[in-house]
């Protein structure tokens, strides 16, 4: 938001420097992000003088040029070559001297230099309006009145004014400070509290407003009272549409608002003066003279002032005529069918209070972030509409003529009253951390136009003006008091207080950091995907239940219309992105959240945490030492998955094979009804649909369960045995259906105290040697005793137990 210092001074007597005002604004919560000095004419006409043409002769080498001598009040006259058709001896003119920088209306700025034009010396420039930014006329040079003083600076002749513009980062809760008068009232509160100021904000006088005739009456009907709690209007007849006076243009230009015409400029002026948006309709384009505020059916069309046709939704509040034809998107943007043009003679002027949530939804959906919308969505003052209407009507009479031709129409079905809040002195001092006397509290509140009445010795009741839409609770009042009292006035404590927080060990954040550090040390790169994604990315091959998707109304990017249901989609998008940039060897991980609707829990929205891994391409960098097969495979993803579990001390879990269509082969590790991780190789159907041309391996951890089980592990350490380990190998002939996990389970049932490791190191299949439906597992066993050197007899005894367990549990035949 931009605020003009000169404009502020029209309402409040300010004697502080521009820099000091900037500091005060920041102190009271209106953070000044920048201060810029401007002139009413760019460059301030520096270096430009008033001169008098003494002689004017034809240029010897050019028919359209003339050689002049000009007196600019200097010791000697200037010779200037001029091409203007109206230049003549005796004229008082505007002269840009050598070294002056000119800022023309069109084109880039340029500097006046001494030079030769067609062989004749020229020591300056006699200027036209457009060449110095005074206007658009370029038909000839400016000829001044006879009483113009030769040698006088042009900036003094034209009374060029300077101004300081504050760029304020207005927070969404400051509905009371969206205008110059709103900012002036905040400054007044500061001056009264901290400097003993006794003045007031000079509000524009509307006492002379009255209805002159009733020749153009209008009717107003509010069909959606929630969307439009108040609607006021008045008509003005026989206005003249023309350019605004210079003072109005200067006010608007100073804050970056382009002047258009007197009527439109007045509505913009009131918006930035009072913080009340207005809209002017061409009354003759509303034949029935009736305004209806309502919503229209989904899919209705509306053509706005920018000549673009927009499709409306049933939540868009529209100002219509009696036939439900849209005249304006309420509080956001006008319609082309009823806008004010140069031919307009009679206008209907709107001043309304619209529901903030309606305006916010509509303006963001249609990408119409107008100044009016940004005020309404913060919460405009419902009790300002009539005053703003009177102020605007009087300005229209002053600058555009015309007659006020109706009574004020004011539809206000349910009055919005000031909110009353009980404020306790003890709460103020407790929150702020210092004692503020009740007298200072009363001064601050009164200076912000808040009514006060005592409740008891410890508290007061405060009525909050309706322009402060965000002040709803006692804590909000305390924030207002602190703003004006001054954050810098609160003493810094000499003591330090701290709170000891206990969190179970290991904490979720600790585990996440540990996992991230572990994966990074093994060559993984972290991904950071959006929680938003496109619905079309949910391809059928991923087997994601679309009934569980959570759709959102994303007005900033309509393509990102759902929340991420599973981590696999974002991961594959990143794989594709890297492959497209010729990064084929990938090890990626991501920690984030997924979002789904749980049908079994009454369509409850559920948010889960995940850790995902994606591996594709070479297992390690190509080098001359490591030869052989280098492509990642199922066992690569399995290795890192089990590494993470081992790293967190998670050892006991159950295993199932994944039957999901997205997996070529995969495993699901779980404990009871809680899933820990599922991992494996993605199916070729998924990869083909996404045009991924090499294998991809994925792991999806439930991060909450991972932390749950990790936090329950009792990790222990023991010394390395001083006694040697012994290895024995065994070949088992088994049925094809028997998995190694079953063999491992049979080995653990023996409960041997000296068996340290069971490892599968070879799988052999041959129908001729083993028989149909058979396979052979070659397994190594590592035995070790912590207290003694093992003897063959003890090892043989353990091996016999293992063999019997394999025969009984797995139907194994020992292969000799």
Image (cartoon, rainbow, N blue to C red):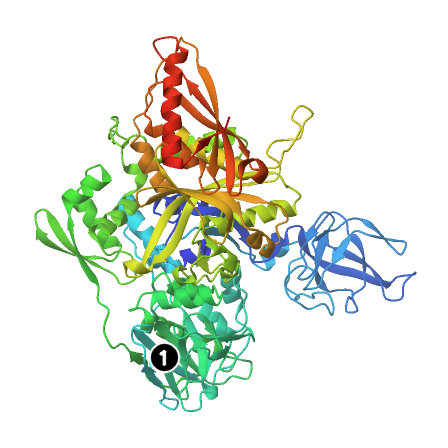
Which is nearer the eye, 304 or 349?
304
Residue drawn 59% across and 34% down? 619
Name of the residue lying farthest toward the left: 456
Name of the residue lying farthest toward the right: 61
Which is nearer the eye, 572 or 78?
572
Label 1: element kind? strand
Specify whether residue 613 is in view: yes
- In this rendering, position of residue 604 left or right of residue 678: left
Residue drawn 41% across and 12% down? 792
> How far across and how far down the image is residue 236, in percent?
42, 83
> How far across and how far down the image is residue 249, in percent?
53, 65
| 617 to 726, vertically: above or below | below
Residue drawn 34% across and 61% down? 202
User: Around disc 1, counting alpha carbons within 10 Å, would you say few (fewer than 14), some (14 to 19), or many (20 or more)?
Assistant: many
Which is nearer the eye, 690 or 383?
690
Res. 17 image quadrant: top left
> How far across and how far down the image is residue 145, in percent?
65, 67
């Amino acid at each position: 938001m931009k605020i003009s210092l000169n404009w502020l001074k029209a309402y409040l007597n300010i004697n502080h420097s521009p820099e000091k005002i900037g500091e005060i604004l920041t102190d009271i919560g209106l953070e000044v992000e920048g201060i810029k000095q401007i002139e009413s004419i760019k460059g301030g006409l520096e270096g430009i003088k008033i001169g008098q043409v003494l002689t004017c002769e034809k240029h010897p080498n050019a028919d359209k040029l003339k050689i002049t001598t000009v007196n600019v009040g200097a010791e000697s006259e200037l010779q200037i070559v001029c091409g203007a058709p109206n230049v003549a001896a005796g004229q008082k003119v505007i002269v840009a001297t050598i070294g002056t920088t000119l800022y023309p209306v069109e084109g880039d700025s340029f500097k006046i230099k001494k030079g030769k034009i067609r062989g004749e010396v020229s020591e300056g420039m006699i200027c036209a309006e457009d060449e110095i930014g005074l206007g658009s006329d370029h038909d000839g040079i400016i000829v001044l009145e006879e009483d113009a003083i030769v040698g006088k600076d042009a900036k003094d002749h034209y009374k060029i004014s300077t101004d300081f513009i504050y760029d304020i980062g207005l927070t969404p809760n400051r509905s009371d400070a969206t205008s110059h008068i709103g900012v002036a009232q905040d400054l007044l509160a500061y001056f009264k509290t901290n400097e003993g100021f006794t003045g007031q904000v000079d509000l524009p006088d509307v006492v002379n407003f009255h209805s002159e005739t009733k020749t153009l009456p209008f009717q107003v009907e509010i069909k959606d009272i929630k969307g439009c709690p108040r609607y006021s209007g008045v008509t003005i007849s026989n206005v003249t549409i023309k350019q605004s006076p210079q003072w109005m243009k200067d006010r608007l230009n100073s804050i970056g608002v382009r002047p258009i015409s007197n009527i439109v400029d007045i509505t913009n002026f009131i918006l930035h003066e009072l913080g009340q948006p207005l809209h002017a309709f061409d009354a003759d384009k509303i034949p029935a003279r009736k305004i209806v505020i309502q919503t229209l059916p989904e899919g209705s069309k509306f053509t706005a002032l920018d000549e673009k046709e927009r499709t409306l939704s049933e939540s868009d509040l529209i100002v219509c005529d009696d036939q439900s034809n849209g005249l304006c998107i309420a509080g956001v943007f006008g319609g082309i069918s009823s806008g004010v043009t140069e031919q307009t003679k009679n206008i209907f002027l709107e001043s309304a209070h619209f529901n903030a949530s309606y305006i916010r939804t509509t303006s963001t959906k249609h990408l119409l972030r107008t100044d009016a919308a940004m005020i309404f969505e913060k919460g405009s003052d419902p009790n300002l509409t009539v005053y703003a209407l009177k102020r605007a009507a009087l300005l229209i009479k002053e600058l555009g003529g015309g007659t006020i031709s109706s009574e004020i129409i004011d539809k206000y079905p349910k009055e919005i009253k000031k909110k009353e809040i009980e404020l306790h002195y003890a709460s103020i001092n407790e929150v702020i951390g210092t004692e503020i006397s009740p007298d200072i509290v009363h001064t601050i509140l009164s200076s912000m136009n808040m009514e006060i009445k005592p409740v008891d010795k410890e508290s007061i009741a405060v009525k909050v003006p309706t322009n402060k839409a965000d002040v709803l609770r006692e804590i909000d009042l305390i924030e207002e008091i602190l703003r004006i009292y001054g954050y810098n006035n609160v003493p810094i404590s000499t003591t330090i207080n701290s709170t000891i927080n206990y969190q179970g060990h290991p904490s979720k954040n600790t585990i996440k950091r540990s996992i991230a550090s572990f994966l990074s040390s093994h060559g993984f790169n972290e991904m950071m995907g959006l929680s938003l994604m496109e619905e079309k990315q949910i391809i059928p091959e991923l087997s994601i239940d679309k009934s569980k998707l959570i759709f959102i109304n994303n007005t900033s990017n309509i393509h990102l219309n759902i929340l991420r249901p599973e981590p696999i989609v974002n991961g594959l998008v990143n794989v594709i992105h890297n492959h497209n940039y010729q990064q084929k060897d990938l090890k990626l991980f991501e920690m984030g959240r997924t979002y789904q609707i749980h049908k079994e829990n009454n369509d409850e929205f559920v948010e889960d945490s995940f850790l995902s891994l994606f591996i594709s391409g070479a297992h390690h960098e190509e080098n001359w030492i490591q030869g052989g097969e280098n492509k990642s495979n199922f066992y690569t993803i399995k290795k890192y998955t089990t590494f993470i579990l081992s790293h967190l001390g998670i050892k006991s879990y159950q295993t199932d094979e994944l039957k999901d269509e997205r997996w070529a082969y995969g495993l699901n590790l779980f404990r009871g009804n809680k899933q820990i991780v599922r991992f494996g190789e993605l199916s070729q159907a998924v990869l083909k649909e996404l045009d991924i041309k090499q294998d991809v391996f994925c792991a999806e951890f439930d991060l909450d369960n991972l932390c749950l089980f990790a936090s329950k592990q009792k990790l222990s350490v023991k010394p390395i045995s001083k006694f040697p380990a012994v290895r024995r190998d065994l070949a088992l002939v088994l049925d094809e259906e028997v998995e190694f996990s079953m063999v491992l389970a049979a080995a653990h049932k023996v409960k041997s105290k000296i068996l340290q490791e069971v490892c599968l190191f070879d799988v052999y299949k041959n129908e001729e040697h083993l028989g149909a439906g058979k396979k052979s597992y070659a397994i190594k066993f590592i035995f070790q005793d912590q207290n003694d050197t093992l003897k063959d007899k003890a090892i043989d005894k353990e091996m016999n137990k293992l063999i019997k367990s394999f025969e009984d549990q797995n139907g194994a035949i020992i292969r000799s």
